[in-house]
C-alpha cells in the first residue's frame, strides 16, 4: 500500500475517534504512532515519517531523524501531502544544497544515504571543541559513507574507504581527487593499505547496527575489532569516531576503551537540534589524542 494512501486512513481514524496523546492504529504493516501531540491539533500541521515501528507524527518545529532505511518525511503543503525534497533532506544533515548524487538515484535512495551519514555541523562543532585551533590535519576517512567527515574537515583527506558502491559513486562525484578504496575493512589487504598510508587523524563512523536500540544489539562488531587492530598497529596521533548513543550502554564501549590504551579520550552526545538545526538525531562523538611520553 502506498504511504500516502495510509495517511487517508489515519485521518479517517482521527476524525472518527478524536485526538489522543498516544495511540496505535493497525494497518497491514506496522502501526501509527502519534507523538508530541500536545503542540498541535491537526495532522496537516505535523511532520510524518514511516519507520519500522509504524507511522510517526511529530510537531512541525523539529524534523524527525533520517535513517538508512528508506523513509522520507512528509508534510502538508498547498492543499496536498508531499515528501521533503532533496534540498530539504540535505539540510537535515547540514550538507550544502549543491552536493551531488548520481543522476539515476531516486529520492528514497538519496534519503537512505543521507540517513546513514553523520551531521556535518555536529562534526565541526565537536572537532572545534576538542582540537581548539584551525584544522590542518591530514586524515583518513574510514566507513566514509557519502563524505560527511570530508565535507566537514576539508580537503586534507588522503584516503577514503567504504564497502558500499553507492557511497563510492557519490563520494567520487563530490571529491574526485581523493583516493577511494571500495572494500571491507575486515580484509587484510584493506588494513594493510590503511596502515601504510600517512595521516594525522583517523576518522571512522563505524557501523552502529549491533549497538543501536533499533538494531539487533548483539554488542559485538567485527568492524570495531578490525578498527582497533588498525589503530593499535598505526598509532595515529588523533582519532575521531562516531556512533549511536546506545554504544555507551554495552560491551562495545569496554572494548573501545581497552583498545585505546595510551590515548586521552573525550566523548559527547550531540544532537543537531541543539545546534539550531531542525533535525532530532543524537549521535555519540569520540575524540582521542595519543599520549606522548
Image: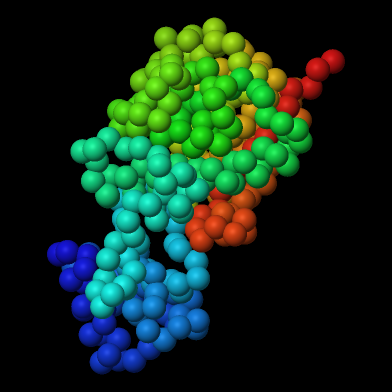
Which of the image's four quarters has the N terminus?
A: bottom left
Which of the image's four quarters has the C terminus?
A: top right
Q: In the picture, residue 228 is in which quadrant? A: top right
How many labels, in total? 0
Whether residue 36 sits left or right of residue 252 in the image: it is left
Q: Is residue 12 above or below residue 237?
A: below
Q: In the picture, residue 182 is in which quadrant? A: top left
Q: Residue at x 40, y 22 (%)?
A: 176
Give the residue at the far front of this rendering: 98
Whether residue 235 sits left or right of residue 162 in the image: it is right
Q: Is residue 127 above or below residue 202?
A: below
Q: Residue at x 21, y 78 (%)?
A: 8
In the image, residue 107 lies at what x, y percent?
Answer: 27, 49
Q: Is residue 219 above or below residue 27?
A: above
Q: Nearer the viewer, residue 201 or 215?
A: 201
Q: Is residue 126 visible?
A: yes
Q: Residue at x 42, y 9 (%)?
A: 189
In the image, residue 112 lies at what x, y percent?
Answer: 34, 46
Task: Describe the colour scheme in one phrase.
Answer: rainbow
Q: Is residue 280 visible?
A: no
Give the residue at the far left of this rendering: 1
Whether residue 187 sits left or right of residue 135 in the image: it is left
In the image, residue 282 lies at what x, y percent?
Answer: 55, 53
Q: Residue at x 32, y 45 (%)?
A: 110
Amino acid at each position: 500500500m502506498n504511504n500516502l494512501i495510509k495517511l487517508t486512513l489515519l485521518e479517517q481514524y482521527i476524525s472518527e475517534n478524536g485526538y489522543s496523546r498516544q495511540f496505535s492504529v493497525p494497518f497491514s504493516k506496522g502501526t501509527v504512532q502519534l507523538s508530541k501531540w500536545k503542540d498541535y491539533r491537526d495532522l496537516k500541521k505535523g511532520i510524518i515519517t514511516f519507520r519500522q515501528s509504524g507511522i510517526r507524527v511529530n510537531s512541525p518545529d523539529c524534523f524527525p531523524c533520517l535513517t538508512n532505511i528508506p523513509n522520507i518525511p512528509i508534510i502538508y503543503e498547498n492543499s496536498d501531502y508531499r515528501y521533503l525534497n532533496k534540498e530539504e533532506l540535505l539540510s537535515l544533515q547540514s550538507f550544502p544544497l549543491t552536493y551531488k548524487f548520481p543522476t539515476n538515484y531516486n529520492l528514497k535512495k538519496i534519503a537512505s544515504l543521507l540517513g546513514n551519514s553523520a551531521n556535518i555541523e555536529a562534526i565541526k562543532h565537536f572537532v572545534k571543541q576538542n582540537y581548539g585551533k584551525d584544522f590542518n590535519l591530514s586524515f583518513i576517512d574510514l566507513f566514509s559513507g557519502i563524505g560527511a567527515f570530508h565535507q566537514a574537515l576539508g580537503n586534507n583527506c588522503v584516503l577514503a574507504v567504504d564497502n558500499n558502491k553507492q557511497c563510492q559513486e557519490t563520494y567520487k562525484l563530490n571529491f574526485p581527487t581523493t583516493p577511494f578504496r571500495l572494500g571491507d575493512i575486515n580484509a587484510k589487504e584493506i588494513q594493510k593499505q590503511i596502515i601504510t598510508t600517512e595521516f594525522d587523524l583517523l576518522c571512522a563512523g563505524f557501523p552502529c547496527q549491533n549497538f543501536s536500540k533499533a538494531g539487533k544489539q548483539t554488542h559485538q562488531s567485527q568492524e570495531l575489532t578490525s578498527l582497533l587492530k588498525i589503530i593499535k598497529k598505526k598509532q595515529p596521533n588523533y582519532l575521531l569516531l562516531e556512533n549511536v548513543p546506545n554504544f555507551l550502554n554495552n560491551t562495545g564501549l569496554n572494548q573501545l576503551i581497552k583498545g585505546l590504551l595510551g590515548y586521552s579520550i573525550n566523548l559527547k552526545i550531540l544532537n543537531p537540534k541543539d545546534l539550531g538545526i531542525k533535525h532530532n538525531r543524537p549521535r555519540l562523538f569520540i575524540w582521542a589524542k595519543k599520549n606522548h611520553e
